[in-house]
Image (spheres, grey):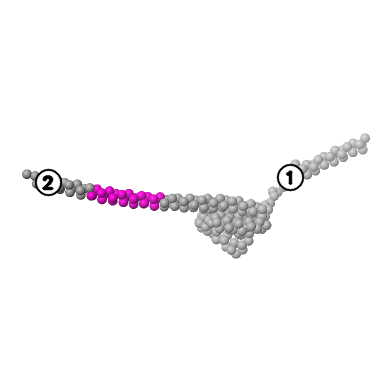
Amino acid sequence: MQPRRLAMVLIVASLATGCAAVDDWAGLKRRKDTPPAPLTDDGQVVAGYLATLDRLGRGGAAEQAEILQATRAAYLEDPSTQHRLRYAFVLAVPGHAATDAEGARVLLGEALATPETLLPSERALADLIVRELDTRLALSQENTALRSASSAFDRDRVIGLNRRLQQESAENDRLRRQLEKAQAKLEAIAALEGGATGRKP
């Protein structure tokens, strides 16, 4: 009886231990002392880009110029993928003196032409900004086209109005000459009638 009880206790204990291990394998039990997953290099790089863009958006004109100069100098000194992207992102941000959507689009196109040199998050961020730049550039071109069409329409309208004004002015001159001739005839008739009346006995 005693060995049988001992065997039962051992079986129950081993089952409990096995269930606990299965719980851990399934990830059902979480340890409170597990540290959060550290940022990968990918995440740190993109976080650096976003921090630069945040400073650029919040900074005054002097800080914006400083950021632009630093990113440009870093890119010219070492045109690596990260320096190229950082400089392109700075140029892409609207609202500062050195905003250059077309220049940013060119730099990002060059970087995306070699996707193997980009981290996944870099590629995603570059794709997102390229789409935004393409939309902005398309709207700018459409706006320019509309302004040109409006200017051409206004120019044609002014030419038409000037032509009409000249025609009306010429018509007024013709009518004035006819009126002057009619007045001269009336004056001549009146003079003849006045002379005829003076000769009567």
Residue at which label 1 appears: 31
User: Which residue is situated farthest in the bottom direction here?
Assistant: 77
At label 2, counting other C-alpha atoms closer than 10 Å, the crowd grade (few under 14, some 14-19, many 20 or more) is few
Does residue 47 appear in this view?
no
At label 1, counting other C-alpha atoms closer than 10 Å, the crowd grade (few under 14, some 14-19, many 20 or more) is few
Q: Position of residue 40 (x, y in %)?
A: 68, 53
Which of pointers 2 and 1 indicates the residue nearer the eye? 2
The quarter holding residue 9 reads top right
Nearer the observer, 167 or 140: 167
* Image point (41%, 51%), residue name: 156
Nearer the observer, 162 or 36: 162
- Give the magenta part as a residue range: 157-181
174 magenta-colored: yes
Q: Quadrant of the C terminus?
A: top left
* Image point (80%, 42%), residue name: 22
Type of amino acid at the residue the image marks with label 1 = Arg
Residue at which label 2 appears: 196
* Image point (75%, 41%), residue name: 28
Could you tell me what secondary structure mostly forms the magenta stretch? Answer: helix
Nearer the observer, 100 or 141: 141
Left or right side of 15 for 198: left
Q: Against 66, is 14 above or below?
A: above
Type of amino acid at the residue the image marks with label 2 = Ala
Looking at the rendered structure, which numbered label has been put on residue 77?
Answer: none
Q: Position of residue 97 (x, y in %)?
A: 50, 56
Secondary structure category for the residue under label 1: loop
25 magenta-colored: no
Secondary structure category for the residue under label 2: helix
| Total labels drawn | 2
Nearer the observer, 83 or 137: 137
